[in-house]
Image (tube, rainbow, N blue to C red):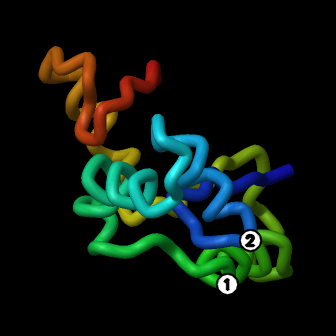
Amino acid sequence: MNSINPGNTTTGLTETFYKVQAKSGDPEEGRKQIERVTLESWNGRAARPEEMGWPMVVLGSKICSYVSGQNLYIDYGVSSTWKLAALQGDAEGGSGHFING
């Protein structure tokens, strides 16, 4: 079985997510916070759902029939900064989150 670990993706839940992120509950404030923390490293935008879907289609196809037990990060390379930050002793990581790994 394979899986994906998606980065910031615009979906029907995006506005709710932005509301929760803002202390005021204002989705615009939440959007700005998320963009400031994460989207600068994600090419300035969140992914579209199909940008998560197509890699899943490929992973489930005969093209990848010998690929098994893998987790594919689809996050515009953001996760690659986590290990680098950990190696450099930066517990905050590239985007403010530390991931053990």
Residue matched to label 2? 12
Mark 1 nearby-residue class (10 Å; few <14, some 14–19, many ≥20): few
What residue is rendered at 48% in x and 41% in y? 24
Callout 1 amino acid: Glu
Q: Indicate whether 50 appears above or below 2.
A: below
Callout 2 amino acid: Gly
Residue matched to label 1? 50
Residue 53, horizontal then vertical, whole percent:
72, 77
Q: Earlier in the sequence, mark 2 or mark 1?
A: 2
Q: Indicate whether 89 appears above or below 13.
A: above
Image quarter of residue 31: bottom left
Mark 2 nearby-residue class (10 Å; few <14, some 14–19, many ≥20): few
Residue 39, horizontal then vertical, whole percent:
33, 62
What residue is rendered at 66% in x and 75% in y? 55
What residue is rendered at 58% in x and 80% in y? 48
Closer to the eye: label 2 or 1: 2
Q: Indicate whether 99 appears above or below 39.
A: above
Residue 93, horizontal then vertical, whole percent:
26, 30
Residue 37 vs residue 95, the one in the foreground: 37
